[in-house]
Image (spheres, rainbow, N blue to C red):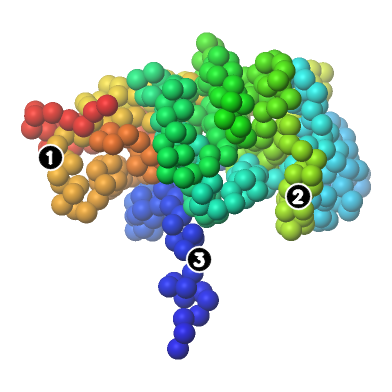
C-alpha cells in the first residue's frame, strides 16, 4: 500500500529539516526529569512569567474588563477597578467591531495601529503610517509572514547573524530557502564586521545563492549586545549597496542594562541618513509584548512596520495576512496599552512606574550577577549582557571532555549541558543550537530566574562546572576562540 500523506516518509522534506534547539533535546530531557519529580529551572526560553515575573497590574485590569464587558455595567465596578482602567477598556471596546470575540481587520484594529504609529513617531522623531503597520500573533508570526514573501526557493538566501535565534534558521528551512550566516565577533563584544558580511555574500553567490535579505537582532539574542548607531549606519549602507531588505528584530528594545549604548531603532538611523538611503532601503521592523518589562509571552502580541515597501507588495502581504482572518484581538489591546502607556497624573501611573521600573532594575542586577558568576568559573568566559534577556558564556571544554562527548554520540556542548541538567536541574540551550564558530562551545541561559534565587543558581552552576573541569582536565589545553 502506498504511504499515507502524513506518514513520516511522505511528509514535506522541509518540515523534517527544521531544527529548533530552544525546545529541543535538552528541553525534552528536562521535561522528563520534571515528571520524575526533579526540580527543574527552565532557563532555556525567554518566558518571564514562567519564572515568576508578576504581570503588570494595569494592562491586566484593562484586558479583564474587555474580556468581561458586562463588568462595566456593574454599579460596583468602580470599587474593583480604577477609573483609568475602566476608561481604557471602554476606549478599546469602542475600537472593535463586536468586542474581543469578533475578528478584526487582518492587519489589526485600525485604532491600535494608529497608536503604534504614534509610538514609533515619538520614539524616532519621524512619521509612521498606520497603513504600513500590521499587528501579528507575536513578532514570530510577522517574521514568518515576511520571510514567506521573500523566499522563492532554495536559490534565495537570507543573511542571519551567528549565533542566531533559531526562529530564523527554522523558518528559512521550512520555506525552502538558504541561510547565509555572518559571524558576530565574540572578542569584540559580539560586534559585526562589515568585511565579514561582504565575504558571506561573496561566498553565497559563488554557490549560486541570491542573497535577498539581512536579519539583525538588536539587542541581540542570544548574545545580548546592543548595536551602536555607527554599526547600524554601516549595516543600512551595506543593505543599500547590496539591494537587501533589512529585518530589524527589535523585540528587546526595552531590555537595556547599561547606559553607554541605549537602544536606537533601525528606522530612526535610516531616516537620519537621508537620501538616497531613507527612500531606497527596504526595512521591516518587528516588536512584541512578550519581552521588555511586560513579558506577556502567552498573549502573542506583536507588530511589524514596513518602510519603503511598494504598495503592490503591501497588498500581497495583506492578502497573505487575510488567510488567517485576524490576529489575536486581546493581544492587540495589550499592544495598544504597551505603545500608548499611562501618563503622569493618571490614577494608576505611579503603580505602573513602580512595577515596570522594579522589573527592569532587577533584570539589570541579574544581568550583572550572572555575568560575574560565569566569569568566576573555571574555563568559562562571558561578555556582559548589555540588553535582551540572555547570557551566552563560552565554555572552554578540555580535549578529554570533547572525546567523552564523541564516545557518547553527542555534540560537545550538548554533552556538557545534559550533564549540567542532570546534576543541577538547570535547563539551558547548547550554543550549537544557535550556531557558533568551529571548535568553540557555548550555552545560552536566560537571566530571568528570580533575583533572590540567582546566587544559589550560580553557586550550583559553579560547583558543577568546577567538578566537570576537574574530571576532564588534563592540562594539555582547551577548545578556545
Image x and y of residue 12, in percent = 50, 66
Neighbours of disc 3 within 10 Å: few (<14), some (14-19), many (20+):
few
Q: Nearer the viewer, residue 449 or 377?
A: 377
Q: Is residue 453 visible?
A: no
Asked if 399 appears above or below 345 in the picture, the reply is below
The Cα–Cα distance between marks 2 and 1, rounded to whole angstroms, is 55 Å
Residue farthest toward the bottom in the current orientation of the protein: 1
Q: Which mark is residue 6?
A: none
Q: Secondary structure at mark 3?
A: loop
Q: Is residue 404 visible?
A: yes
Residue 281 lies left or right of residue 30; in this view the side is right
Mark 2 or mark 1: whose residue is earlier in sequence: 2
Image x and y of residue 423, in percent = 26, 44
Q: Which mark is residue 316?
A: 2
Asked if 287 appears above or below 176 in the picture, the reply is above
Q: Which mark is residue 12?
A: 3
Which residue in the protein does label 1 denote?
400
Image x and y of residue 47, in percent = 53, 41
Is the C-beta separation of discs 2 and 3 under 8 Å? no
Mark 1 or mark 3: whose residue is earlier in sequence: 3
Amino acid at each position: 500500500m502506498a504511504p499515507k500523506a502524513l506518514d513520516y516518509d511522505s511528509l514535506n522534506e522541509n518540515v523534517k529539516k527544521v531544527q529548533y534547539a530552544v525546545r529541543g533535546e535538552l528541553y525534552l530531557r528536562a521535561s522528563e526529569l520534571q515528571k520524575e519529580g526533579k526540580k527543574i529551572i527552565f532557563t532555556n526560553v525567554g518566558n518571564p512569567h514562567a519564572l515568576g515575573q508578576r504581570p503588570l497590574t494595569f494592562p491586566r485590569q484593562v484586558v479583564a474588563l474587555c474580556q468581561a464587558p458586562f463588568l462595566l455595567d456593574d454599579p460596583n465596578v468602580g470599587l474593583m477597578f480604577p477609573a483609568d482602567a475602566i476608561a481604557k477598556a471602554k476606549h478599546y471596546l469602542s475600537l472593535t467591531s463586536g468586542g474581543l470575540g469578533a475578528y478584526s481587520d487582518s492587519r489589526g484594529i485600525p485604532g491600535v495601529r494608529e497608536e503604534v504609529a504614534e509610538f514609533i513617531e515619538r520614539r524616532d522623531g519621524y512619521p509612521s503610517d498606520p497603513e504600513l503597520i500590521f499587528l501579528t500573533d507575536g513578532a514570530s508570526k510577522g517574521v514568518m509572514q515576511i520571510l514567506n514573501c521573500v523566499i522563492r526557493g532554495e536559490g534565495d538566501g537570507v543573511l542571519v547573524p551567528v549565533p542566531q535565534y533559531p526562529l530564523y534558521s527554522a523558518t528559512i528551512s521550512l520555506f525552502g530557502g538558504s541561510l547565509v550566516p555572518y559571524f558576530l565577533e565574540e572578542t569584540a563584544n559580539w560586534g559585526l564586521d562589515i568585511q565579514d558580511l561582504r565575504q558571506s555574500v561573496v561566498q553565497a553567490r559563488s554557490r549560486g545563492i541570491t542573497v535577498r535579505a539581512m536579519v539583525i537582532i538588536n539587542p541581540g539574542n542570544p548574545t545580548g549586545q546592543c548595536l551602536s548607531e555607527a554599526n547600524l549606519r554601516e549595516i543600512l549602507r551595506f543593505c543599500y549597496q547590496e539591494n537587501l531588505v533589512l529585518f530589524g528584530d527589535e523585540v528587546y528594545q526595552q531590555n537595556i542594562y547599561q547606559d553607554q549604548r541605549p537602544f536606537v531603532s533601525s528606522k530612526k538611523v535610516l531616516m537620519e541618513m537621508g537620501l538616497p538611503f531613507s527612500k531606497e532601503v527596504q526595512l521591516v521592523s518587528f516588536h512584541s509584548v512578550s519581552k521588555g518589562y511586560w513579558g506577556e509571552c502567552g498573549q502573542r502580541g506583536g507588530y511589524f512596520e514596513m518602510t519603503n515597501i511598494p504598495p503592490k507588495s503591501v497588498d500581497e502581504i495583506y492578502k497573505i495576512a487575510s488567510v488567517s482572518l485576524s490576529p489575536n484581538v486581546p493581544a492587540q489591546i495589550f499592544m495598544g496599552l504597551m505603545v500608548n502607556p499611562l501618563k503622569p497624573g493618571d490614577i494608576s501611573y505611579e503603580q505602573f512606574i513602580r512595577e515596570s521600573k522594579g522589573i527592569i532594575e532587577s533584570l539589570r542586577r541579574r544581568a550583572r550577577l550572572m555575568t560575574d558568576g560565569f566569569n568566576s568559573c573555571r574555563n568559562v568566559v562571558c561578555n556582559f549582557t548589555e540588553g535582551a534577556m540572555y547570557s551566552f558564556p563560552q565554555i572552554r571544554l578540555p580535549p578529554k571532555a570533547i572525546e567523552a562527548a564523541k564516545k557518547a554520540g553527542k555534540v560537545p556542548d550538548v554533552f556538557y549541558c545534559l550533564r549540567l541538567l542532570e546534576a543541577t536541574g538547570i535547563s539551558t540551550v547548547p550554543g550549537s543550537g544557535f550556531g557558533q564558530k568551529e571548535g568553540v562551545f557555548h550555552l545560552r541561559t536566560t537571566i530571568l530566574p528570580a533575583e533572590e534565587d540567582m546566587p544559589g543558581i550560580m553557586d550550583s552552576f559553579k560547583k558543577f562546572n568546577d567538578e566537570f573541569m576537574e574530571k576532564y582536565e588534563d592540562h594539555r589545553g582547551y577548545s578556545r576562540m
